[in-house]
Image: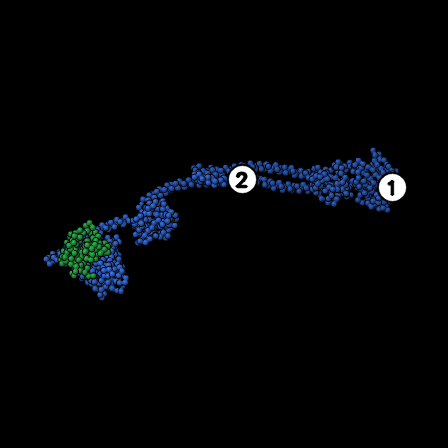
Chain colours: A blue, B green
Amino acid sequence: MGDKRDDSSGRGFLPKVARIFRPKISAKILIYFLLIALLPLIVVSYVLVTTANNQLLKNASTNQQAVANDLARRVDNYLANNVNALAYTGRLYATQDFSKSQTDQSLRTLFDQNANLDQVTLLTANGDTGKQRTLTVQGGKTKIAEDTIDTTPDILEFLADKPYLISVGRTADNNPQVIIGVPILKKYGSASTDLFTTQKGDVENIAGALVGYYDIGDLWESVLSTSVGDGGYAYVIDGVGSLVAHPDRKFLDSHREVAEVQVVKQFLKGDTATKSTVSEKNKEVISTPSKTLTGWGVIVEEPVTSIYSSINSYIQMAATIGISAVLLSIMAGLFFSRQLIRPIRELSLGAKRMERGEFDQPINVKTNDELEALAETFNRMARGIKKLISDLKVNNLKLKFEQIKLNNIISSVSDGIIAINKNGEIVSINPPAALLVSQDPKTLEGKQVFEQFFFEHDGESFTPDIKNGGIYHYTDLTAKRGDSIVYLDLVVAVLEHPDSDVSAIITIHDQTASRELNFMKLDFVAIAAHELRTPLTVVRGYLDILNTSAARELSVFNLENLSKAIVGANQLRELINKLLNIARIERGDMEIFIEKLNLSKLVSENVEQHKSMAAQKEQVLSYETSAKGAVYVPADTASIVEVLNNLIGNAIKYNNKGGKISVSLEVNDKEVRVAVSDDGPGVPEDLRERLFTKFYRAERSLIAGTRGTGLGLFISKTIIELQSGTIGIEPDQGKGSTFYFTLPIYDSARDDEQIAKKSSGGIRGWFKKRPSS
Amino acid sequence: MAGLKNVLVVEDDAMIRDLYKMALANAEYTVEVADSADELYSKLARFKPDVMFLDVMLPGTSGLQVLKELRSNPKFDCTDIKIVVLTNLAQRTVADNAMNNGADGYIIKADILPKDLPKVIESLEEE
């Protein structure tokens, strides 16, 4: 038992694990709420952030381009102004043929007009020697220094090709310095001298050059202090990547070349698109270059962080909203799941109560929805089940009672009852049936019924049919019980539609006792008859002696009395013989001793013997036959005599006084037929069938007061049929009746074997042993 | 009535014994009777029957037992005489048994008429 319990708990383990990992509905609802709240938030946030990012980038790009272009234009303007101022002064100098003082004056004016001009140098090419005049500003005063130095023809030659020359350099204190050179021509055209249309000089036409040195540090600081967005700025480079201006003075001081910076590199290749790149200070930036007319570049850049700073705050806001949403949805989820779960928990508890068999406490759910309906259904179901259970209990009791009753009946009946299934195995058996094979009913269950019970019929093994539906009666079966033989009747009820395990029920009725009782009865009749016979034998014997030896001494009257006494004694003998024969027939030991019998002689003699009896009723008894000579049949003489006595005796008895009785014997090659006909009242149609049954006498004979046992025809029928003959009454011909019997013709080949080894020689009661062959 | 002259009737029922004796005497047979096996054996010492009517039911013993004794024991000198068994019960198996043990026939006492007994003896003469 202990092992078994271990097994069951082992089996229960898996479901337990499953239960642990099965999420509760409340958790599910929570998860659903979170998903519902967060998923759109995440999606929307992502879309918004991406869109905003792109927009910000676009805005930054547009803004940067505008700023860059604007700065580029300002640079251009600044340079153009200086170039034009220089060019104007140079032109004045060349065309007005200034005196020395006029020249100085015009240079001073140039200084006055431009605070950033540190120094201006006039290179002249007139004469063989070029003279260079240099003006510098020192302490608010303009000092003019004049050197006579070799004209640098390279510069002049260089300037001859160009309207101006701009280069970047550094002052002694490392300030960026723009050097602008313009040519002084011998002859000027009428064209304007602005930056864009400055007339190109040629070597032949060039007279000199005016070169201005501009300190742009302070000036451009203000220009370049233009802030771009949040933390953005602009710086300027020249056409080869030298740093011209930068808001960060320290950076400007320490760096001259920025050609290797990515954005500069791109700019120098001609790409001026807005890019996310790495700045000159190695920072993540968005930068946009713009090209000036002089080939310089203005590069505007903003740190990425500043561009996206607005986004970050948005993301922060979104995150805050998201978290709040999560918290809210958790709370809402908890709330709703509680609300939802409570009735379900109620239902679950109710179902568990039902499982325990408690149906009285209803499930109380008032949610006014499907759950309430479900609870109602549950409650109805509980009531229904409760009622069903109580009905079942009542029915169970009834069934039990019926079962007990049936068991009592089955076990108390004397008949054996065996229920078998379709395989012929014993399902149930009662004690009387089991007793037949001297076994306990329990040990027989499950065994093959016909391997336990053996029946015989006429000495041969017999097995009832249990396959085809219907009720079958089998009688005169025998079976062995121990050393004795029991006689049985069987009723086998084979179910047409076996519903359960029972397919047939065999009822065994033990006939042994009643058979024995019947035999005792028959024995009693036989013994009584025998006891009667002995004194009767004596009576008949002495009557016979009297009849033969003392007849001549008796008077006619006494002779008649003697004759009546003999008739009465004979009648008594016949009656006793009939009783004996009936007893024998009933017991089945009616014995027939077949011999070769001359039937024609026997019938003829028997008719003669009855003539005196017929004469008493003034009847005419006749015999006729178509047979020539003896007709032999294999038959038992004494019994055939009995049949003839019966048929002829009946005819005389039942025919009217003065009637006719004719006995005939017809023969063909197979059988002989003896018929006894009378012209009496005949036999009513409805009685004919019962005529040859036991104890039947036609009613008319009762009315007529004719005595008789009614056994004669029954005995005759048995006798004739035992000898392979037939007996009957012919159909009503309107008058009288005809009884007949047939017997097979003697055939030595067929009959000699069974012919008894004794013969009576026609003497009643004497059987002589036949000589053995 | 050729050679079978001496008849011995062994029957315990006095009425039947006397009846048979009377019937056979009337037919001029020499008849002796015995009412038991013992009397039979003592009768045989001085009477030699040609035919014996032997009842199957004798006081204290069975006629069949006596029949076997007579047929098997030469001292009775009955091995070749005619022996007819008398039976009251129409139990023919008993009669058959008798015939198998040496009887020459049997008589059902209830059915036979005493006047037919000489005919029985005559039929025994026909071999």
Residue type beneath disc 2:
Lys
Outermost top residue: A139
* Relative image position of residue A582 (x, y in whole percent): 23, 53
The residue sitting at 85% across, 37% down in the picture is: A135
B11 or A202, which lies in front? B11
Of helix, strand and loop, which one carries label 1?
Answer: loop
> Label 1: which residue?
A150
Q: Is residue A343 above or below residue A573?
A: above
Report the chain holding disc 2. A
Q: Which mark is residue A28?
A: 2
Q: Quadrant of the C terminus of chain A?
A: bottom left
**Callout 2: few (<14), some (14-19), or many (20+) C-alpha neighbours within 10 Å?**
few
The Cα atoms of the two marked residues, 1 and 2, are separated by: 97 Å
Badge number at residue A25: none
Q: Name the amino acid type tagged 1.
A: Asp
Residue A378: percent from left, percent from top: 45, 40
- Quarter the N terminus of chain A occupies: top left
Answer with mark 1 or mark 2, whichever residue precedes in sequence. 2
Position of residue A155 measured from the top left corner of the image (x, y, whole percent):
84, 43
> In the rendered structure, the residue with mark 1 lies on which chain?
A
Using the image, determine if residue B116 lies above or below residue A424: below
Q: Closest to the observer: A12 or A309?
A: A12
- Tell me the residue at 84%/41% (across/down): A210
Coordinates of residue A46 in the picture (x, y in percent): 62, 41
Write the residue at 26% across / 54% down: A588
In-front residue for pair A335/A742 = A742
Residue B116: quadrant of the picture: bottom left
